[in-house]
Image (cartoon, grey):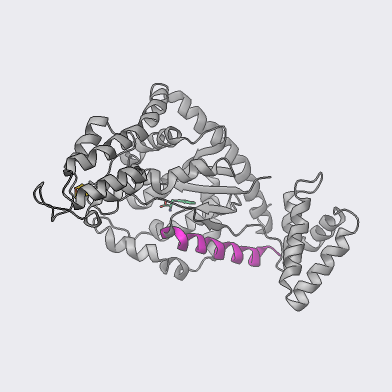
Amino acid sequence: MRARVLSGMRPTGALHLGHYHGALKNWVRLQHEYDSFFFVADWHALTTHYADREVIERNVYDMVIDWIAAGLDPDLCTLFIQSRLPEHAELFTLLAMGTPTAWLERVPTHKDQIEHLTDRDLATYGFLGYPLLQAADILIYKAAYVPVGEDQDSHVELTREVARRFNHLYGRSPRFEADVAAALAKLPPGQQELLERQRREFGQDGNADALGNGEALIRQNAGRHGFTAEDGEVLLGHLKGTGRAVLHEPQALHTEVTRLPGLDGQKMSKSYGNAIEMREEPAQVEAKIRRMPTDPQRVRRSDAGDPARCTVWQFHKVYSDAATQQWASTGCTTAGIGCLDCKQPVIDAILREQQPWRDRAERYLANPKQVHWIVEMGTERARTVARQTMKDVRDVMGLAY
Ligand code: TRP
Ligand code: SF4
């Protein structure tokens, strides 16, 4: 069975090239290697945009179209919408009971955002809960990896702490010993003794190899006939001496990402007015790049420039091959080319990159039912997993009456 990755995006505006190079391109690659779940985090969007509902409404399906246009293949990955799965809210509520508010207040993004988004009142209960809702999103699918930018690391770390606390509080149900015995009995001959030995060596001597070997042994049995995922969790908890690991601690996945700045050199963002949308009209793209500021010290065509002072150069680094980069940098420092000459290969490359997106999106824009259907399928697939987790969670919390 392939490990699961899960990630989400907030539908607060049309996706732009920064989203593509910073995240989406990576998702497209991951879908081939992992059991991939990607979702529209519409509730998360509401934590900041609770007063502009039409923004979110307009962008939900548009964002899914952007995803598919970029190459996410609904046959390879599971695409869904957070708010269609009330199970996320249920887990969020249950986790909220035992999560200290101090854990949420000290998440760095919390203070940062309140300071930066001064035009919004973010002293809300929902906004404080943002990272805990994210923890629920991740834990409900028992995701192994969460592909996110480094700015989200603290949220994944909180998710791990929340899972640990949950397993500690509820993993040792009265049934646990019986579950362990039943799961041990399902191991092939000889493995039961082996696992018990590894458990002793880890528990008494803290032998990390024994832990690793025990985990490997449990993993080997995963998917074997009659040995359920629950059996695996029970034995894992038994091995570690923690009780059943109902919720799994995920890891952030930092794969190589390309940072594409906005047209003015700041972070690309729709709200800064420095973005190029993924499916922006070619004429617009061309006009925007042509207007883009260059090295401020290169005032006249005859002045030599320095690419290090120019955002167009950052675009060359993402979009141009070595020969074109060489041409641009030499032309700039010798005043051999003008800035509009320099920009042309970038314009061409962006338009070339966008063409397949526009083509793919067109089919779905003409047939919105098909997009709805894709999301419907994904939502049902996600629901099967989310329901099972909630059943386990209610069970160990003593809510199964
Ligand atoms: N907070 C993420 C962002 O701003 C979006 C998100 C919500 C998310 N839930 C998630 C990402 C779960 C990964 C996993 O980009
Ligand atoms: Fe920037 Fe190119 Fe102009 Fe140099 S020639 S300042 S790199 S746009």
Residue 391 position in % (x across, y down): 66, 49
Which residue of the protein is positioned furthest toward the right in this rendering?
189
Measuring 60% from the left and 53% from the top, which residue is drawn there? Answer: 144
The answer to whether one can see residue 201 in this image is yes
Measuring 32% from the left and 37% from the top, which residue is drawn there? Answer: 350
Please identify the quarter of the rendering in which residue 197 is found: bottom right
Figure check: 226 above or below 106: above
Q: Which residues are magenta?
A: 151-173
The answer to whether one can see residue 262 in this image is no
Magenta residues, dominant SS class: helix
Q: Is residue 3 left or right of residue 300?
A: right
Q: Is residue 231 left or right of residue 111?
A: right
Residue 214 position in % (x across, y down): 77, 63
Which residue of the protein is positioned furthest toward the top in this rendering?
366
Viewer-side residue, 130 vs 31: 31
Please identify the quarter of the rendering in which residue 119 is found: bottom left
Viewer-side residue, 394 vs 37: 37
Measuring 33% from the left and 60% from the top, which residue is drawn there? Answer: 113
Viewer-side residue, 142 vs 255: 255
Quadrant in which the N terminus appears: top right
Residue 87 position in % (x across, y down): 55, 47
